[in-house]
């Protein structure tokens, strides 16, 4: 078995594969973040050097993983509370104003559900780090979505991200991959992604009743979703963890 990780700049013919075979990779409700379309609808055309496909020689015509990043200009001393949403927003402003990007932010690293647990995510992160460095950037940042946090949605992210094993590495598997690769946990992005919808939207996305006001525990969510029955509205505000990679 040979897995190659290549950018769309080198293999534009792989673009179509990145929209296939990834059903179930993310909870359904996460596909409705309003900022996502601003990036994904143009990423293949505008940022092909920062879009990656992982392909396995034993599965021709399919992708086993995908990764996305985006260049942007960020000069503030701290990375933003807005996390994932803010990175996409700032990258868009950078492009539209003609500003010169000075860092790159990861947007997604995703392994096909049936191919997880074999270390491919670490290889994709390494490929992203190399590509960013090869293009002259000295910093890759990532608004990391900790892979184990959904099992403890009521625990504040600041406490979860601070948990370490006896060897000093993070308890969370995905944060641990980043730290092992050379990343440094910098801060929590308290409102990295915000998804709102009517109660009917949330029922369709989750299969849950959403018939009582208050926090709702949704499978796959890192924190509870806030439900307001009187106003027919629910909102999810997801915290992520900023990790900085010096290249």
Image: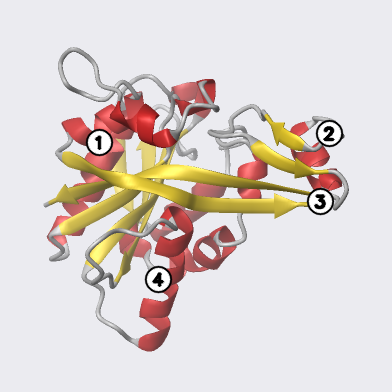
SS state under label 1: helix
Could you give the CA–CA distance between mark 3 and mark 2, rounded to whole angstroms?
Answer: 13 Å
* Residue denoted by label 4: 90
Q: How many numbered marks appear?
A: 4
Between marks 2 and 1 in the image, the one whose residue lies nearer the viewer: 2
Q: Is mark 3 on a helix, strand or loop?
A: loop
Viewer-side label of 4, 3: 3
Circle 3 or circle 1, nearest the eye: 3
Image coordinates of residue 138 in percent, x first then y, are: 12, 60
Q: Which of marks 3 and 1 is nearer the N terminus?
A: 1
Residue 140 placement: quadrant: bottom left
Q: Which mark is residue 85?
A: none
| Earlier residue among tags 2 and 1 | 1
As drawn, the label of residue 212 is 2
- Nearer-the-camera pick, 8 or 139: 139
Query: For the residue carrying disc 2, how many other residues have a C-alpha within 10 Å: few (<14), some (14-19), or many (20+)?
Result: few
Label 3 crowd (10 A; few <14 / some 14-19 / many >=20): some
């Amino acid at each position: 078995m040979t897995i190659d990780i290549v950018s769309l700049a080198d293999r534009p013919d792989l673009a179509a594969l990145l929209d296939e075979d990834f059903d179930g990779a993310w909870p359904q409700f996460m596909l409705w973040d309003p900022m996502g379309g601003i990036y994904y609808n143009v990423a293949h055309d505008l940022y092909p050097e920062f879009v990656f496909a992982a392909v396995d020689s034993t599965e021709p015509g399919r992708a086993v993983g995908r990764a996305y990043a985006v260049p942007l200009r960020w000069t503030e001393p701290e990375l933003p509370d807005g996390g994932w949403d803010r990175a996409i927003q700032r990258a868009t402003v950078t492009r539209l104003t003609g500003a010169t990007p000075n860092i790159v932010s990861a947007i997604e690293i995703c392994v096909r559900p049936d191919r997880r647990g074999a270390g491919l995510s670490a290889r994709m992160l390494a490929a992203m780090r190399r590509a960013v460095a090869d293009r002259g950037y000295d910093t890759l940042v990532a608004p990391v979505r900790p892979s184990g946090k959904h099992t403890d949605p009521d625990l504040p992210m600041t406490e979860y991200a601070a948990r370490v094993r006896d060897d000093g590495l993070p308890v969370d598997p995905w944060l641990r991959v980043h730290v092992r690769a050379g990343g440094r946990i910098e801060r929590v992005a308290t409102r990295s992604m915000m998804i709102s919808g009517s109660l009917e939207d949330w029922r369709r996305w989750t299969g849950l009743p959403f018939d009582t006001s208050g926090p709702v525990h949704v499978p796959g969510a890192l924190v509870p979703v806030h439900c307001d029955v009187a106003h027919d509205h629910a909102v999810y505000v997801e915290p992520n963890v900023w990790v900085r990679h010096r290249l």
